[in-house]
Image (spheres, grey):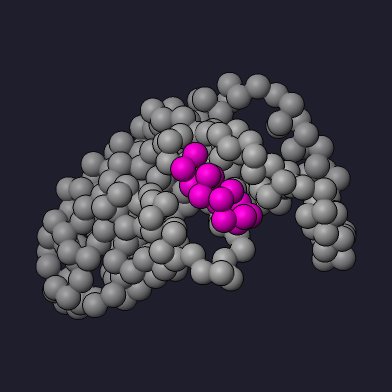
């Protein structure tokens, strides 16, 4: 479940409870979030953890963006609700913190029976992570986070730039992302109106149109179950990012 931007994209316990049925087995919890950049505050995380505990729902918490937060802090649901230990799986990896996307190294911290089943599955699917990538990942996680701090400062600058630039486009409204490296603006104001001699009635069509007319790619919200939004990554060159958003604005202003 992905919430709308009315609550900063954060799902409430009430929303979770209304979606729960007797067949609900697990909750996938992603904070900081891809695609929204939302970061849940500790009190909300704890409330969700207590709800899961009460209803014996397994929590799968993907903490891959744990170190990429801006002005707020990541907290693990298991640290806030330790009683979840027997029913909680923590996922993480080197792709984001150490900018090692493509190395294909991640890890899972899970109850022994879950870990055993995952090992059996993986050993038949991929055997293991190649040794070179394992050694590189070991070096990454054994070091300090000083390089991450440098990278984070640049992300923070880009985050502010893209947030401001997207909001300058007539018809686009964007919340300030607090984590990860995505802005997730509401783009419904660009639908069903003239754009470069054409028009789009969904964000999927809009993404096609913007790609074709401005050579700029964004992921339409439909891919995440939330039509009307677009995901813009700022894990890219700053000048290219500014230029990309400028091209969308030019397209909109030309009508
Ligand atoms: C929330 C989340 N989890 C996990 C991953 C996986 O990263 P990788 O497969 O590169 O290790 C991603 C990558 O986009 C992500 O956004």
Q: Is residue 195 magenta?
A: no
Percent from the top left, x then y, of residue 182?
Answer: 41, 48
Residue sitting nearer the eye, 57 or 94: 57
Q: Is residue 55 magenta?
A: yes
Residue 240 visible somewhere in the drawing: no
Q: Say if 144 sits above or below 134 in the image.
A: above
Residue 56 visible somewhere in the drawing: yes
> Could you tell me what secondary structure mostly forms the magenta stretch?
helix
Which stretch appears magenta? 46-59
Residue sitting nearer the eye, 255 or 54: 54
Quadrant of res 205:
bottom left
Q: Is residue 201 left or right of residue 99?
A: left
Location of the C terminus (image quadrant): bottom left
Which residue is located at x 80 percent, y 42 percent?
Answer: 134
Q: Is residue 97 left or right of residue 226?
A: right
Percent from the top left, x then y, of residue 73?
Answer: 46, 30
Residue sitting nearer the eye, 7 or 80: 80
Which residue is located at x 53 percent, y 44 percent?
Answer: 50
Which residue is located at x 41 percent, y 46 percent?
Answer: 37
Quadrant of res 234:
top left
Q: Is residue 208 left or right of residue 103?
A: left
């Amino acid at each position: 479940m992905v919430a709308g931007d009315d609550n900063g994209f954060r799902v409430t316990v009430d929303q979770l409870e209304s979606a729960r049925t007797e067949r609900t087995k697990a909750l996938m919890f992603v904070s900081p979030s891809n695609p929204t950049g939302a970061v849940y505050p500790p009190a909300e995380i704890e409330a969700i953890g207590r709800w899961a505990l009460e209803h014996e729902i397994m929590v799968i918490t993907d903490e891959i963006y744990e170190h990429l937060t801006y002005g707020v802090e990541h907290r693990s649901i298991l640290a806030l609700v330790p009683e979840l230990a027997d029913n909680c799986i923590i996922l993480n990896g080197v792709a984001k913190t150490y900018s090692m996307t493509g190395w294909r190294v991640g890890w899972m911290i899970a109850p022994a029976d879950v870990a055993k089943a995952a090992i059996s599955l993986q050993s038949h699917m991929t055997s293991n992570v190649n040794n070179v990538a394992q050694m590189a990942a070991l070096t990454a996680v054994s070091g300090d986070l000083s390089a991450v701090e440098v990278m984070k400062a640049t992300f923070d600058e880009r985050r502010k730039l893209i947030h401001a630039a997207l909001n300058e486009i007539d018809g686009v409204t964007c919340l300030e992302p607090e984590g990860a490296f995505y802005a997730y603006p509401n783009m419904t104001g660009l639908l069903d109106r003239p754009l470069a001699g054409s028009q789009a009635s969904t964000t999927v069509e809009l993404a096609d149109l913007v790609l074709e007319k401005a050579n700029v790619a964004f992921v339409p919200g439909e891919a995440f179950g939330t039509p009307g939004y677009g995901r813009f990554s700022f894990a890219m060159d700053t000048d290219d990012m500014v230029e990309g958003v400028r091209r969308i604005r030019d397209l909109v202003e030309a009508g």
